[in-house]
Image (tube, grey):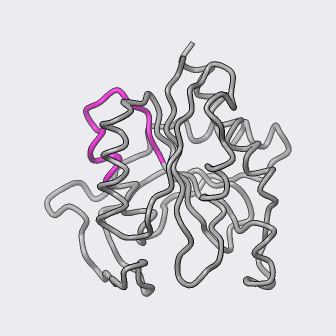
Amino acid sequence: MLKVLLTGFEPFNGARLNPSEQLVTRMKSDSVPGAQIMTAVLPVVYGEAASHLLALIDEHNPDVVISFGQAEGRTGITPERFAVNLNDASIADNKGHIRVDQPIHPNSPTAYESTLPVKELVSALRAEGIASNLSLTAGAFVCNHIFYELQHALQDKNIKSGFVHVPLMTEQQEDFPGLFTMDIETMVLAAKAMVSVLVAKAD
């Protein structure tokens, strides 16, 4: 049985919803054959999100960690390839912190690569008729922050890990007029398909 930890984020920047939160709360322990799924919702606060995520890994000792986050303007599910060693965002986290041009870990690598099979994940989603593209980086806000902390902490451990951005959900159309949205059921199907790929690779 593959132990899989899935995390999402609470709403941020004044939003009412976060599709990544809605996604992980719909994933049950037995959602995917061959996988034991654990879920959590992280705060959109730089240090707290990272420490919470790493504590969950210590507690559950998963085989795989996939963190999900919202990226308005994206037109599909986008696995991220690289986490960059940079906090640099014009918006504040949920405790009012703004970080500009700050390294996450001074004297550490400029970037870490996802250890998820990101191209295979994109192909699997497309095979299911779900819009998906590979993204180079996760930006430089809290999503990227936890992605970098995750890869930094697990670089010498046998745990597959990475970050996936999801687009806005249908219920956010009124709050983000003109931007692409996807129904949450499709996002759940995407998460299940990605976990299934990892289960198959572990066999």
Quadrant showing the N terminus: top right
Question: Which percent across, then down, holds residue 163?
Answer: 50, 51
* 111 is higher (above) or lower (below) than 3: below
In the rendered image of this protein, does residue 122 appear above or below residue 17? Answer: above
The residue nearer to you, when weighing 114 against 71, is 71
Q: Kindly give the residue lying farthest to the right in the view shown.
A: 129
Q: Is residue 184 magenta?
A: no
Residue depicted at x 61% and y 49%? 24
Residue 203 image-quadrant placement = top right
Number of labels in the image equals: 0
Please state the horizontal and vertical placement of residue 96, each as a whole percent of the image. 37, 85
Towards the viewer: 35 or 142: 35
Identify the magenta region.
149-162
Q: Is residue 160 magenta?
A: yes
The structure residue drawn at horizontal position 31% and vertical position 69%, both measured from the top left corner, is 86
Q: Is residue 18 left or right of residue 169?
A: left
Q: Position of residue 113 (x, y in %)?
A: 40, 46
> Toward the viewer: 103 or 95?
95
Residue under the point 28% across and 59% down: 110
Figure quadrant of residue 50: bottom left
Q: Is residue 112 above or below residue 202?
A: below
On the rendered structure, is 194 left or right of 107?
right
